[in-house]
Image (cartoon, rainbow, N blue to C red):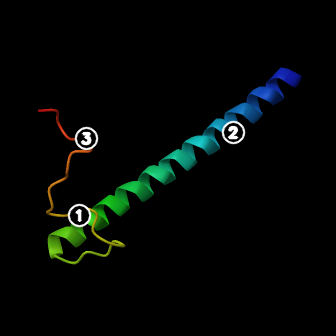
Amino acid sequence: MFEYELQQMRSAELIREADNYRLVREVVRSRRAAKREAARSGHDDSDGRVHTNRFRRHRFTSAA
């Protein structure tokens, strides 16, 4: 009887974890879709642009 109760608790825990995982994936998908839509419409709602048009400099100079 005790093993059955443990199995039921574990089953309920796994179901909760799966529901949480699905919810997180849904939120991630909706955020990505919103970003794509914002980029497509030309409105950038992010906190700031990360990419610039400047070329990156090498950290170390090359030996001649």
Nearer to us: label 1 or label 2: 1
Can you identify the residue that label 3 sits on? 60
Residue 26 vertical placement versus 5 (above, below): below
Whole-angstrom CA distance, mark 2 to mark 3, is 52 Å
Picture quadrant where residue 18 is located: top right
Please give left or right for residue 31 compared with residue 57 in the image: right
Please give left or right for residue 24 compared with residue 6 in the image: left
Point 82% across, 30% down: residue: 5
Please give left or right for residue 31 compared with residue 3 in the image: left
Mark 3 falls on what kind of element?
loop
Point 27% across, 44% down: residue: 59
Say which amino acid is labelled 3. Answer: Phe
Can you identify the residue that label 1 sits on? 36
Mark 2 falls on what kind of element?
helix
Residue 17, how many percent across, how many down? 61, 42
Please give left or right for residue 26 compared with residue 45 in the image: right
Point 62% across, 40% down: residue: 15
Whole-angstrom CA distance, mark 1 to mark 3, is 37 Å
Picture quadrant where residue 13 is located: top right
Residue 26, how many percent across, how many down? 42, 55
Nearer to us: label 2 or label 3: 3
Q: Residues within 10 Å of mark 2 (few under 14, many from 20)?
A: few
Residue 32, how many percent across, how many down? 32, 59
